[in-house]
Image: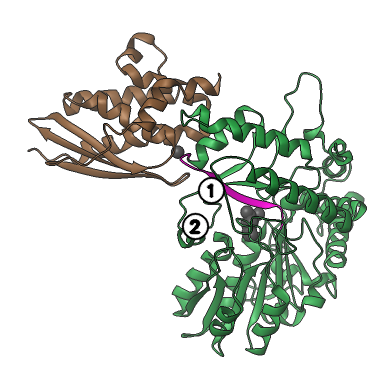
Amino acid sequence: MGIENIYSEILMEHANSSHNKHHLAHATHTHRGINPSCGDEIELEVFIKDGRIEDASFTGSGCAISQASASIMVDLIKGKTVEEAKKLADIFTGMIKNNITDEEELEQLEDAVALKDISHMPARVKCAVLGWHTLEEVAKNKKTC
Amino acid sequence: MSNRYKEDFPILRQEPGRKPLIYLDNAATTQKPETVIRAMEDYYREYNANPYRGLYEISVKATDRYEEARSVTAGFINAKEPAEIIFTRNTTESLNLIAYSYGRSGLEEGDEILIPISEHHSNLLPWQQLAREKKAVLKYIYLDEKGSLREEELEEKITNKTRIVALAYVSNVLGTIYPVKNIIDKAHSAGAVVVLDCAQSIPHFPLDVQELDTDFAVFSGHKMLGPMGIGVLYGKKELLLRMPPFLTGGEMIDYVAEQEATFAPLPQKFEAGTPNVEGAVGLLEAINYIRQVGYAQIGAVEDALTAYALDRLKQVPYLTVYGEDSRTKNRCGVISFNLEGVHPHDTASLLDADGICIRAGHHCAQPLMKYLGLAATCRVSLYFYNTKEDIDALIASLMKVRRWLGLGN
Ligand SMILES: Cc1ncc(COP(=O)(O)O)c(C=O)c1O
Ligand SMILES: [Zn+2]
């Protein structure tokens, strides 16, 4: 496993770009996630209508892995139902914990598969899952609207 | 400039087929010389027994070696007698012992505890929690932008209500060496006791508790070539005698009845339960090793390395060093820095790919980081077995980081 693979083009593109990093005008839910080990912080904002994530964004600061992972996640969950997004979160955590290795299953994660090798870097696992954990919290607290 | 000490440390030896280890996280824990590792192994191979209790030869030997470690430690920091040395697990436990035992019995509402803002959480939380419990006041000494203590700030903060002044001899984030003799004298004039956290000083320069006249001094074996799990608490005898036990149980009693007990004399009063003989034996060997190399030599090697490291770091584009950024007599080889636009955790992960170990994060000093306006930093911390080659490797790796992350140079 080369570290270069982890800090791959796609990851750096997300870490350095800001297309998902802004506030939502009409967020129905926001949730803050913190990774105490390196101080990563994100605030996820989503606009949910009829059980579907119509729009999503995040703000925050932290390491490249936490920020890129959150950004890739935002791309991925836009337009998905909350249930589908929860399923993706399960697959993502499964991948990072090395419990899910089935290629076909992982394909659903699209660009987020770039973070697969984090499973070999225990010190960075929390960075990678921060966005997804925050999403799970949002899903848990979801009021029907 | 290679370094003859590396050979004494199995983990640092260059061996065919093994990736060289460039270890620059010595403030977190140091590597162990062969002699320390062997002494601990010998203990288990030859005389492992529960000390104090056994009426047979190996138990007597285990007891002797454990007590020898205590007297050697006492001599090492110039304590008046071995009974002033209490073995704990680490610096953190030593500080908690003082806060619980001395602090709880001696503090009243409105009393003040004074600590610098730069303290490690280990020397902050015990006081913060004690202050909350006792309705005492925890006050902070703030630093100037280089991390130095300001004299006026000290004058102003020490009052006749100050009961405890607790501080590190050397900052684990900025490497600053604080003028502790001066602080101890001022604290004593105000009637306060001083707790000196020597975790980051004793690996690098001598501690003389009588000359400093400190009331308490604490440190960890693992940061001075010894094993993890053994720590030291030095306390002036007249204070330790007055203090109630911290933990109670076996080994720390004279006599136990159904409803009452009398406690063992010092130092056993503060060492409840089966002690860490292996750790004490390792610490003893670590002290022997440090004595053999000599603090003068350790200081000379580290001064040169620190100056070199600071010079080289200045050559790295987009890099900022925090605190004192040139070598002075008021700083040790603990260096915090950041690369612009790069989170310290990413820097550390990328250096790791080149076999370079550094620390990244808040270094257990969140109030200091907040005071300095920083979320996290990278930290390099040197020891006498490090070399210029180690620093060169660090610099070469750092030069690549921003490019690797797609930030140009
Ligand atoms: C200044 C200082 N105090 C206390 C500690 C805590 O030491 P330990 O974890 O061995 O208890 C450290 C360790 O990082 C330190 O640097
Ligand atoms: Zn992170």
Who's brown, chain-wise? A
Q: Position of residue B4 (x, y in %)?
A: 89, 39
Ligand 1 within 8 Å of the CB at mark 2: no
Q: Is residue A70 above or below residue B150?
A: above
Q: Which residues are magenta?
A: B332-342
Residue B258 appears in the picture as rendered: no
Q: Position of residue B98 (x, y in %)?
A: 63, 71
For chain B, give the colour. green
Marking on residue B377: 1
Q: Quadrant of residue B220?
A: bottom right
**Quadrant (top left, top right, bottom left, bottom right) of the N terminus of chain B:** top right
Mark 1 lies on a secondary structure that is strand
Q: Is residue B160 above or below residue B253?
A: below
Crowding near the residue tagged with mark 1, few <14, some 14–19, many ≥20 C-alpha atoms within 10 Å: many
Q: Tell me the amino acid under the disc marked 1.
A: Thr
Marking on residue B369: 2
